[in-house]
Amino acid sequence: MDLEEKERNKCSDVASKFSISPLFMSIILGLALTGLLISDFLCYMSTTCMPSKTSYSIQFVILMSHLVAIGLFLFAFIHATEMKKPVHKTLSIMAGILNLVVFILRTVLELIFSNYQ
């Protein structure tokens, strides 16, 4: 093994250690958005909690969070496919499904309660 090959292997080892982080970031962000969605839904359904209409800036931040989570899922899926890691590929697909379902439910919730007040 020459020096160049050792350096290349060292770089690939470092890259493989950090390769799973987009996957976990997508899962964590998806779970956080799920919690926020459940909290908003319970607040809308409760008679004791009168939610104020969500401002456009908060809606924009939530939308961007969904887009970041879906982008991280896509990046994690492509990376897992290229690295031929079936466990990571399955986890990234599950994260993608979670993020897409939460995004669709958030859109439906916002459309249903758009004329709440």
Image: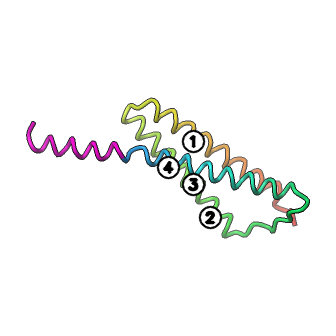
**Could you say where residue 65 lies in the image, as x and y percent from the top left?**
59, 58
Find numbered disc 4 in the image and state the secondary structure of the residue it sits on.
helix
Distance from label 4 to label 1 (Cα)? 9 Å
Q: Which mark identifies residue 67?
A: 3
Magenta span contains residue 2: yes
Q: Which mark identifies residue 72?
A: 4
Q: Residues within 10 Å of mark 2 (few under 14, many from 20)?
A: few
First in sequence, mark 2 or 1: give its number. 2
First in sequence, mark 1 or 3: give its number. 3
Distance from label 4 to label 2 (Cα)? 16 Å
First in sequence, mark 4 or 1: give its number. 4
Along the line of sight, the residue nearer the viewer: 112 or 47: 47
> What residue is disc 2 on?
61
Q: Residues within 10 Å of mark 3 (few under 14, many from 20)?
A: some
Identity of the amino acid at label 1?
Answer: Gly
Distance from label 2 to label 1 (Cα)? 19 Å
Q: Residues within 10 Å of mark 1 (few under 14, many from 20)?
A: many
Identity of the amino acid at label 2?
Answer: Val
Q: Residue at x 56, y 41 (%)?
A: 95
First in sequence, mark 4 or 2: give its number. 2
> What residue is disc 1 on?
96
Distance from label 3 to label 2 (Cα)? 10 Å
All told, the count of numbered labels is 4
- Image quadrant in which you'd find residue 16: top left
Distance from label 1 to label 3 (Cα)? 11 Å
Residue contact at pointers 1 and 3, CB within 8 angstroms: no
Magenta span contains residue 76: no
